[in-house]
Image (tube, grey):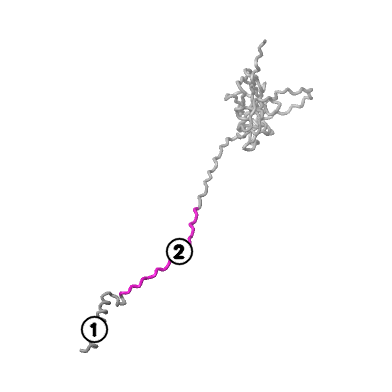
Amino acid sequence: MKRGHILILVLIALAAISLLGCNALGLGSPQSLQIRATATATIRPPFTPRPTDTPWPTFTPVPTAIPVTPGVLSGVISSTVNVRIGPGTNYPAITKLNKGTKISVRGRDIESQWLVLIPPPNGWVNRDYITLNSDPNSLPIIDAPPTPIPTPTFAPSATPQPTATPSMYVDFRSDAPWVIAGQCTTLRWDVEGVRGVHFNGQGQPGHGSQEVCPGQTQTFVLHVVLNSGYLDRAITVAVLPAPPTQTKP
């Protein structure tokens, strides 16, 4: 065999060995190649803020209704004022009420200018110094006690012709509108044309009287039963403190 043929056979054998080595290592198979995937960047969605909490509405309590006693009004003294025994500055003062004092009113005079308090204290106060919770014209009219200031005496006039007696007549009065502590006075009444008269819870004749000795300022009520309904007449007797006794030197 020629040397050239031997060289060719050697080259062929080396090529075969090379091919066998590549197959053994897995380099020659296309299936053995692995393609690595490239990750794609994910875009984050824009930030959406969460809605804020809606606060609950504030609970407002319903104001409690203040009970109102029929025939009685409540009020507050708007300025320092005298409490008098009758509806007018010609009546003596019993005491004073300061601004802001709470009071209760049970009656009025015919002009609604003076109001009668529910004791304590007992007496009359000028309407201009009271702030009321309602119209004072809704209160009953209370007869004023006789004025303590004497009125001038005039010459008697001609005697008028007698008039017919009214079907109903109620007169309730006191001999003195005020007394010194420890003294007494007499209450008198003349009532006609009614069904009954009561004083201090007891039945009385239509014409009568009662001596009273109040220890403090007190209101007395004459209860008159009409043919339909009833009528009350009230008189307040003020009790003034006794003057101090003077000792001789």
Q: Is residue 44 magenta?
A: yes
Quadrant into which the N terminus falls: bottom left
* Three-letter amino acid code of the residue under disc 2: Arg
Residue that badge 1 annotates: 10
Write the residue at 70% across / 28% down: 89
- In the image, is residue 28 above or below residue 112? below
- In the image, is residue 176 above or below residue 72? above
Residue that badge 2 annotates: 44
Nearer the observer, 196 or 87? 87
Q: Residues within 10 Å of mark 1 (few under 14, many from 20)?
A: few
The single residue placed furthest to the bottom in the displayed view is 2
Please give left or right for residue 4 compared with residue 197 in the image. left
Please give left or right for residue 109 compared with residue 202 in the image. right
Q: Residues within 10 Å of mark 2 (few under 14, many from 20)?
A: few
Q: Main secondary structure of the magenta part?
A: loop
Give the mark toward the camera: 2 or 1: 1
Q: Secondary structure at mark 2?
A: loop
Q: Secondary structure at mark 1?
A: helix
In the rendered picture of this protein, how many numbered marks are placed on residues? 2
Q: Estimate the x, y position of residue 85 in percent, counting from the top left.
A: 66, 26
Q: Is residue 91 magenta?
A: no
Q: Estimate the x, y position of residue 185 in percent, counting from the top left.
A: 64, 19
Q: Is residue 168 visible?
A: no
Nearer the observer, 98 or 234? 98
Q: Which badge, 2 or 1, is on the more N-terminal residue?
A: 1
The single residue placed furthest to the top in the displayed view is 249
Q: Which mark is residue 152?
A: none
Instruction: Tell me the magenta residue range.
Output: 32-53
Q: CA distance from mark 2 to mark 1?
A: 65 Å
Q: Estimate the x, y position of residue 60 in percent, counting from the top left.
A: 53, 45
* Three-letter amino acid code of the residue under disc 1: Val
